Amino acid sequence: MGMTIAEKIIARASGNEVVKANDICTVELDLLMSNDGTSHITVDKYNALKHPHIADVSKLVWIVDHNLPSDSVKTADSHKKMRDFARENGITYYEGEGVCHQVMLEKHVRPGQLIFGADSHTCAYGALGAFGTGVGNTDYLYAMVTGTSWVLVPETLRFNLKGKLPEGVYARDLILTIIGQISANGANYKAMEFGGEGLNSIDMAGRISICNLCVEAGAKTALMEVDDVALSYLKEHGREPVECFSPDPDAVYAQVYDIDLSTIKPIVAKPHFVDSVVPAEEAFGTHIDEAFLGSCNNGRIEDLRIGAEILKGRKVCPDVRFLVVPASRDVYKQAMKEGLLEIFMEAGAIVMNPNCSVCWGACQGVIGEGETLISTGTRNFKGRCGHRESFVYLASAATVTASAIKGEITTADKL
Amino acid sequence: MEKFTGKVWVMGDDIDTDIILPTEYLVFKTIEEMKPYAFSPLREDIAKELKSGDIIVAGNNFGCGSSREQAPEVVKALGVKCVIAKSFARIFFRNAINNGLLLIENADLADDVKEGDEITVTINDKIEYNNKEYPIVSLPENLMEILDAGGLVKAMRKRNGLSD
Amino acid sequence: MGHTIIEKIIAHNVGHEVKPGDIVTVDVDYVMLDDIMMPFIVSKFKEMGFRKVWDPNKTVIICDHLVPASQVDDTRAYHISCDFAKEQGIANLHRSDGICHQLMTEAGYVKPGHVVFGTDSHTTTYGCVGAFSSGIGYTEMASILGTGQLWMRVPSTIRVNITGKLPSNVMSKDVILKIIGDLTAAGATYKSLEFTGDTVENMSVSSRMTMTNMAIEAGAKCGLFAPDEKTAEYCCIELDDFQKSLKGDDDAVYEQVLNYRAEDFVPVAAVPSNVDHCVPISEIDNVKVDQVFLGSCTNGRLEDLMAAAEVLKGKKIAPFVRFIVTPASRKVYTEALKNGTLDILLDAGADITHPSCGLCCGRTGGILTDGEVVVATNNRNFLGRMGTNKVNIYLASPKTAAMSALKGCICST
């Protein structure tokens, strides 16, 4: 019987010829990513162990991105704990390089790997054909100490993409549409696998955006077939695949969806759930206080290009704080080189250092009582981005930028 | 002439406004919410221990630093009757007068007095401590007018024909 | 009898001669209101019974301490600022353009000879263009908004005369730190500091700003430079006769004159936790550094960023050291972007934030914890200013800051 991509990666990681959905396997992890959201807690738990030990320090990557620069003594304390531990133990450590998932994709992730990240959006690595999944810090600690963990092999939902996204519609609209369709728990415990000829027309930034958001449908991981687009990204970043897995023709799927990309339209997710999606025009006219272009979901150079292109020759609405936060140092540098940051700054945007910003609801950019944000971030849960009485709409880079210009929700073609 | 007696808290030179009230508490809505954090970088518990009618005695340059008026307001809100220092920073001095917080300059008291002791102040006249008298120089007339009105807000209300 | 600069500015404002100690009421040319004080300014203004500000065109509101918001309550001050501007018809509203003291001269408000008050102690900065400017509390600001006037005592003047050529590793920051160290933190209380001599005449307006910005750290009411051709160019004006006259007369009476030889200055730092604890870098050059902060209204200008870039070009900062760069304004950021300065700093490992007060006001932007050491280019190293009371803050020049980031310990170029 054939295997899905998720099954093949777990088979490799567990040393089995074949695994099937719902098997429980002991796997060897390829990489273990942790960020400043929880690393300090992991350190505390590690230090409380009777025989603290790191199985293979070369597999650990620790990244400070959530509260950077530090916004409080509490943050400074947890950063210090994390930094000192990484330094003492020789852990690969980044501070100021960017949002963790973007840094991982730029510098570490390789097709075929099985990766744990102490962050739910670790599923983003599927864009490079790697099985990334979010874990809590106890699971993380176990993997860090033993180099292994157990996983339940997930069932897979298959998404066959065909056709092309229309002009002015983006991968972000696609994944929001899918989440709206299958709902916020529609992929619970499952893998979401994307393929089909339609995938060819979606660039790496779009693919990362799609995989990254799959956890919002409850998915354990997201996976894409590794094609020339992914391989050339990998090559540009100086890495080789571990192994490129494609699903077998007779792989077993829990469900198969056929999606015609040409039917996708600009979408917004309304407060307070990611699956509360409506066509963008249904939210037109909603007053906004802040707009956010950034995050591991939509802060890449391709997203900034989309924003800058719309903003060029225009001004940000004076009543809107338009936060532009490149997802990494490399993205920031590239945006600088291409003149994008100049466009943003001269139009009145707030250009910040690469960090999680308002997507995480801390560290500069938080919204206050009664305020409304339109965001390219990952989540619009109640209170996620600041005050518990505030409102978050999720949309594409284009829709967010257009709304920042207008001062209310709109799409770029309506400007 | 008004006369009062109070318990003394002693502080050193250059008690700056970041000590009197750190920046992170400036955004609180009310002075009342800021009270527990007064002087916290220097003496974490003093805000709890200060009682109405107590007197702060300090060295040179009390209130140096920022223009944050929350600093004198929070000192007054804690019930501090007056601050006696060898000298005061300029902006703090104006802010204190504008809020009706009495400030007294005296060069010698800070070197003599011990924390916890009581002193007696006669406004615009003298301080008495340990059978010794310390003279007080009176304030300029325009400042006395603001103080007499009960602070600048009240003075302005009067100017605008409003009652207290 | 001759007059000092401050006496001339006040005399011109009130229309008669003045001498130190006189109590006068001045007409205010500009007021600067910053976001963090706005809630209190507005409530006092209303409580006083005022309805309209005396002159919306002379009122400037700047959101800089709390933008972008780092805590959920921060947006309250922002909205109160925007609402008050709208209600009063105040067009001079800056919501994310940079630090107030940078903008007041850079955006073309303050000119030589003006009388300006702001709700921030570093309002002394505008003396860099020969304006009298000073910090006040929110109650007095509310009264000015209602009346356009404020009482003041004419200060006596301390003249600081510097002649000669500064060593190449010395910046105006080192000069003012040394002067504050000599004067002490209260040495100029109630007084005007007047900077003269060919050394300061040769300084850019930006370098002068660093010095007037820090005049308050010696307790001064204001710091002043005589306006000259550089001032005129910076302000985009031709100096009129009054502005040209704004220099200390030969027979002006100074309370004190301090004379310095430029060649004697060395790179210095103000060591924890007082601005007047001035120590040569050579005496502390083994102190390990955790973080470096380049920014603030004291030293976040283009020339400061460029000085740091010169040190760091093609190099990487020391491992595990954080290097936070916060340009003073949107204009500074954009210029540094265009001339390649930000690129160099970014490559060296800097975190470049949006222009704002950042770490200097201790609200966000790199808060530290017990035992950590920060070399910072801003104006205050008070206890607890950037985190806990066990954070060690060393104030230094941009060159020293950059060098310290590079080496991971305090050192100068």
Image (spheres, coloured by chain):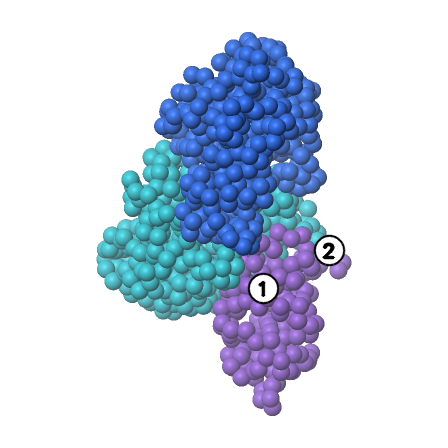
Chain colours: A blue, B purple, C cyan
What is the quadrant of the C terminus of chain A in the image?
A: top right
Which mark's residue is nearer the viewer, 2 or 1?
1
On the image, numbered disc 2 is attached to which residue? B161
- Residue A188: % across, % down: 66, 28
How packed mark 1 is, by other alpha carbons closer than 10 Å (few <14, some 14-19, many 20 or more), is many
* Residue at left offset 46%, top offset 41%: A60
- Residue A52: % across, % down: 50, 51
How packed mark 2 is, by other alpha carbons closer than 10 Å (few <14, some 14-19, many 20 or more), is few
What is the quadrant of the N terminus of chain A in the image?
A: top right
Q: In this rendered view, identify the residue nearer to me: A393 or A344.
A: A393
| N-terminal-most mark, 2 or 1 | 1
Residue A296 against residue C320 in the figure, above or below = above
Q: Hey, which residue is sitting farthest bottom in the picture? A: B131
Q: Which mark is residue A125?
A: none
* Residue at left offset 60%, top offset 10%: A260
Q: Chain of mark 1?
A: B
Q: Chain of mark 2?
A: B
Residue C171 seen in this snapshot: yes
Residue C52 against residue B120 in the figure, above or below = above
- Disc 1 secondary structure class: loop
Locate residue A28 relative to residue C229 in the image: left or right.
right
The amino acid marked with disc number 2 is: Gly
The amino acid marked with disc number 1 is: Ser
Q: In this rendered view, identify the residue nearer to me: C303 or A159.
A: A159
- Residue C277: % across, % down: 39, 66
Q: Hey, which residue is sitting farthest right in the picture? A: B163
* Residue at left offset 57%, top offset 71%: B140
Contact, CB < 8 Å: mark 2 with mark 1? no
* Residue at left offset 57%, top offset 28%: A221
On the image, numbered disc 1 is attached to which residue? B40
